[in-house]
């Protein structure tokens, strides 16, 4: 008999039948504001436990409104959802101590130092041992690189330092789920790299990270799963690799004979997507790039360069929504 691992609260342990254990599940989650504006339109999220889940979409696509509903900060108009196996908002008192969140930028007392602000927050948490408060605050500040500025008043913090303090607040105790809304906002490139490294570290320790962002490289570098939002609707979700497959791989041929090259590509069954004065590009599909090279050479087409262009997240977004990623709604 196979020995199954012990389950944490809210976790479904898979046996012989594969069951996807989720940190967040929503069913038809919808938010309408007065006047009839639909900010979030019947979305069904499934965030696997232990994943780094990228919640992707341009500003105004409904990401933050969705997060606020998931955390119980605002009530949905329709639908329901579970967080860590508990129905929300009924299970909020039990679940939220296990959830760390940074949403819409942190809010702290401006006249207190960073350390004192964290001490206030920690003192309000009745689920932790107050005797370990100093050690936990020190560790949280250390993890986000704010130890040297811990005694500085919050009102004198830069935007990046305020983001770091918000992350420290979310990390005051071990969390099963960490919800981050644009966590690298205001950070310099070094700070952004440090936050990415921290996210990877937390995921390696078993924390599920729900990362909302409009920065495609940020999501692509750290996430195992991705969901794409557009105009309040959930367009697609799945593993990063599966979503990349939603946009077709292309072959780009640089040549002085683009029309002749296009004819060859068409004869191979490839759909020509672009033709220029010195190049032609086509959807590669199941055809191997070696076959393309051989066919061009046999046809006497001179090839200066042949590149296989694999889709990135921007390609995926355009493929799924038909619009650019800089859409402002």
Image (spheres, rainbow, N blue to C red):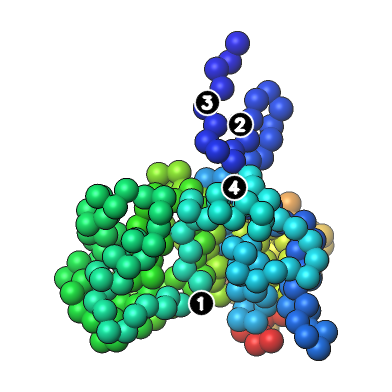
Residue bearing mark 4: 84
Q: Residue at x 46, y 59 (%)?
A: 100
**Label placed on residue 5:** 3
Where disc 2 sits, the SS reads loop
Residue 17 location in percent, x, y? Answer: 71, 27
Q: Determine if residue 273 is in view.
A: no
The first of marks 1 and 4 along the sequence is 4
Q: Quadrant of the C terminus?
A: bottom right
Q: Residue at x 73, y 52 (%)?
A: 286
How much space separates mark 4 and mark 2, taking CA atoms? Answer: 13 Å
**Label placed on residue 104:** 1
How much space separates mark 3 and mark 4, taking CA atoms? Answer: 18 Å
How much space separates mark 1 and mark 4, taking CA atoms? Answer: 22 Å
- Answer yes or no: do the residues labelled 2 and 3 have beta carbons within 8 Å? yes
Q: As displayed, is residue 202 above or below residue 40? A: above
How much space separates mark 2 and mark 3, taking CA atoms? Answer: 7 Å
Residue 55 location in percent, x, y? Answer: 60, 65
């Amino acid at each position: 008999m196979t020995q199954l691992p012990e389950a944490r609260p809210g976790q479904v342990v898979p046996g012989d039948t594969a069951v996807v254990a989720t940190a967040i599940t929503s069913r038809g989650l919808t938010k309408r504001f007065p006047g009839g504006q639909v900010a979030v339109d019947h979305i069904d999220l499934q965030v696997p436990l232990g994943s780094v889940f990228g919640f992707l979409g341009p500003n105004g696509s409904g990401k933050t409104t969705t997060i606020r509903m998931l955390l119980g900060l605002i009530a949905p108009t329709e639908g329901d959802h579970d967080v860590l196996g508990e129905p929300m908002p009924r299970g909020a008192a039990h679940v939220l101590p296990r959830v760390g969140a940074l949403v819409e930028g942190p809010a702290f007392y401006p006249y207190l130092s960073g350390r004192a602000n964290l001490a206030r927050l920690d003192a309000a948490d009745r689920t932790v041992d107050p005797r370990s408060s100093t050690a936990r605050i020190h560790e949280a500040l250390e993890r986000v690189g704010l130890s040297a500025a811990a005694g500085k008043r919050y009102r004198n913090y830069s935007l990046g330092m305020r983001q770091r303090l918000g992350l420290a607040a979310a990390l005051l105790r071990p969390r099963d789920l960490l919800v981050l809304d644009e966590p690298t906002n205001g950070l310099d490139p070094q700070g952004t790299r440090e936050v990415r490294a921290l996210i990877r570290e937390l995921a390696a320790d078993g924390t599920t990270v729900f990362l909302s962002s409009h920065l495609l490289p940020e999501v692509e570098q750290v996430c195992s799963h991705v969901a794409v939002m557009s105009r309040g609707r959930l367009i697609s979700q799945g593993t990063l690799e599966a979503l990349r497959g939603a946009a077709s791989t292309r072959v780009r041929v640089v040549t002085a004979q683009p029309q002749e090259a296009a004819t060859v590509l068409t004869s191979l069954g490839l759909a020509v997507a672009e033709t220029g004065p010195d190049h032609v590009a086509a959807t590669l599909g199941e055809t191997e790039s070696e076959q393309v090279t051989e066919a061009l050479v046999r046809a006497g087409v001179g090839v200066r360069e042949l590149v296989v262009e694999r889709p990135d997240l921007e390609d995926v977004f355009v493929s799924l929504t038909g619009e650019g990623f800089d859409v402002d709604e």
